[in-house]
Amino acid sequence: MQQVAADLEIDFKSEKYKDAYSRINAIVIEGEQEAYENYIQLSQLLPDDKEDLIRLSKMESRHKKGFEACGRNLQVSPDIEFAKEFFAGLHGNFQKAAAEGKVVTCLLIQSLIIECFAIAAYNIYIPVADDFARKITEGVVKDEYSHLNFGEVWLQKNFAQSKAELEEANRHNLPIVWKMLNQVADDAAVLAMEKEALVEDFMIQYGEALSNIGFTTRDIMRMSAYGLTA
Ligand code: Y39
Ligand code: FE
Ligand code: FE
Ligand code: FE
């Protein structure tokens, strides 16, 4: 099934494709940069996991370099200003939580929400990517599963004392994800990535993560409903 991009006859060199790619590629580059910074901050908040978190941060900076190469390969300049604006809501909430020492909120934002968003986006992108970007993204998405796993394991171990803060952080941050998905839907469609597929993959990853951490199906239904109308 690796022929999907060819079957769709996507023209990676068209102005329309490159224009959309200048924003999506920037989102991914900026996202990887912020993920790098977030794991550095988490390593300071969680000294027991410092080594692991530094290792994760290094993976994020490798991802950033990989996606920068994808843009160069298509002769696209990423619109980083647009991408910073795109991430401003989650970025601000992460910074505020970090300043207050709210490590559970930081983990929900980076290791659950942002990682699930990345996994959904990369899974949906891989079959419709150009050959160069597909190889890079296939390597990256494997790492993202390990980042999600870090968050799941930590939050599962500390579930009882984290549950209320997770619910609060979900309520504040999940609506932002739906707004981000709506903002990117038109550009994603130009890359042959359907919004419905992104939403479906995100909800599967996020729901599974909440379940692994210890939430009941009933909790997950309730938590997933936040912001669906954003
Ligand atoms: O942990 C990570 O590496 C995540 C930072 C990267 C975020 C990627 C965000 C992807 C959203 C792309 C939306 C395209 C439809
Ligand atoms: Fe990454
Ligand atoms: Fe990651
Ligand atoms: Fe509140």
Image (spheres, grey):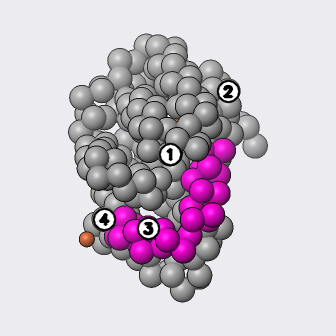
| Distance between the alpha carbons at the discs numbered 3 and 4 | 10 Å
Q: Which mark is residue 172?
A: 4
Q: Which mark is residue 156?
A: none
Main SS, magenta residues: helix
Q: In this picture, which residue range is highlighted in magenta?
A: 146-171
- Give me the residue at 34% from left, 60% from top: 173
Q: Amino acid at mark 4?
A: His
Q: For this view, does 101 lie left or right of residue 127?
A: left
Dot 4: element = helix
Task: Give the quadrant of the N terminus.
Answer: top right
Q: Nearer the viewer, mark 4 or mark 1?
A: 1
Farthest right residue in view: 1
Q: Give the mark, 2 or 3, whose residue is nearer the N terminus.
A: 2
Instruction: Tell me if label 4 and label 2 are in contact, CB under 8 Å.
Output: no
Q: Amino acid at mark 1?
A: Leu
Q: Which residue is mark 3?
A: 166
Vertical relation: 203 (above or below) 96: below
Q: Which residue is mark 2?
A: 135
| Distance between the alpha carbons at the discs numbered 2 and 1 | 33 Å
